[in-house]
Image: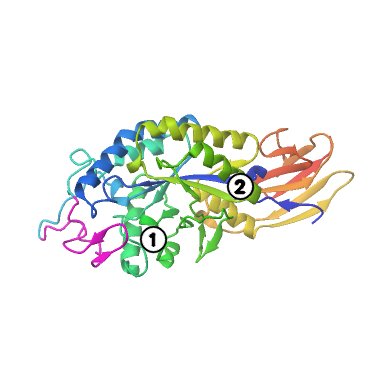
Amino acid sequence: MNGVRLEPWKFGAKAAVCFSADFELAWAARHVSLERALAEAQRTRDAFPRLLASFDSFEVPVTWAVVGHLLLDACARDPSTGRAHPEMPRPGPYANRYWTFDRGDWYDHDPCTSAIEAPEWYAPDLIRKIIASPVPHEIGCHSFSHTDFSDNRCPPSLATAELEACHREARWLGRRLRSFVFPANFPGNFGALAACGFISFRGPPRWDLTYPAKEQGLWNIPGSLQLFDPEVDYMNRLPRYLGAGARAGSAVHLNFHPSLLDVRMIDETLAPTLRLVKERERTGDAWIATMDQIASFCETRGRAVVRTESGGGASRRFDIEWPSGGADYPEPSLTLSVPWTGSLPSCEIDGSEVPSSSPDCFVRDGLLFLTLSRPQKVAAIRSR
């Protein structure tokens, strides 16, 4: 199409970089050991202020995949039955490679008190700090009670109830959940996820870096590298991952568990990581985005139609037909590139001039890059 290219990533970046956090406090480890669960919750609370401050200081957004129960300020047992959350279905007994649930009630460990009395099991204070951040973090979903979401251990009725409970509590905080991280990386119940309005999920880690793929109605943004493993030399491995991602045009998905974080790692591992990623962003090698932003870009890029018309002289016009994604895809955008030599041209989007050398209009390596966001539908360029 006359040299016009739909770029794989926003702003013409060579790769996308995403951070996601499994935000669980005590919920993930309770069927392994209550002592371990409480210790993981305490580590999360100890690290959280500096963790969030570090991401915010570098202006790097995170998809915080929150166990839904953490959104609650308080809960109570049913006075007639003594059960916690009697409205919620329960999984049957099962075991996976991380934990065993073979007796009792799924919510036996729920203290049914409040965030003040049992801060290991509730975290509305921490979630509100994420929402109040000047950085546009995403609140994602990690199920309501951290149950195995695989098809053979989680009936569709249970999956739907878990997701609806998470949506209900998130609405109280003014957030819509769009991205899902499977507890312990056991995938399943994709039909329930799509029916409940989710658009992306973090797939199990892959050895090869890949471009996100749409699977069963949702965008799979697979994990690439888990942070904060004390056995890993990140300052050696991260540049290799980011370089490979730029060469492949892929997404580099860095994920972590705040519950496993030693506070010292924030300075020793996280700060150098963020500094490196921001340098890649500055050179055009990386677009830093949340899971829902990546899914929205990929959806728009996959369905948009771009038509070009040549005007007089060096003028060119591009008409863009956008897919109708509604509220499911919150930030649809496209980046186009065309071969260009000489000085920066004048660029217009929907009749308004784009500032020269802005992220939305610039020349690099013989290409002119134009970025449009809905509802912008017409772009034009002309020599100055």
| Whole-percent x, y for residue 109 in the image | 18, 52
User: Hey, what amino acid is under mark 1?
Assistant: Phe
Q: Which residue is mark 2?
A: 244
Residue 284 lies in what quarter of the image?
top right
Q: Is residue 172 left or right of residue 307?
A: left
Front-most of 355 and 26?
Answer: 26
| Whole-percent x, y for residue 187 in the image | 41, 62
The answer to whether residue 272 is above or below residue 298 is: above
Q: Main secondary structure of the magenta part?
A: loop
Q: In 3D space, how far apart are the residues under numbered discs 2 and 1 (Cα atoms)?
A: 27 Å
Query: Magenta part of the protein: which range?
Result: 81-110
Q: How many marks can you see?
A: 2
Instruction: Answer whether residue 59 is visible to the viewer in this image.
Output: no
Q: Which residue is mark 1?
A: 186
Front-most of 365 and 138?
Answer: 365
Tell me the residue at 17%/56% (across/down). 108
- Indicate whether residue 93 is drawn in magenta: yes
Q: Quadrant of the N terminus?
A: bottom right
| Whole-percent x, y for residue 159 in the image | 34, 63
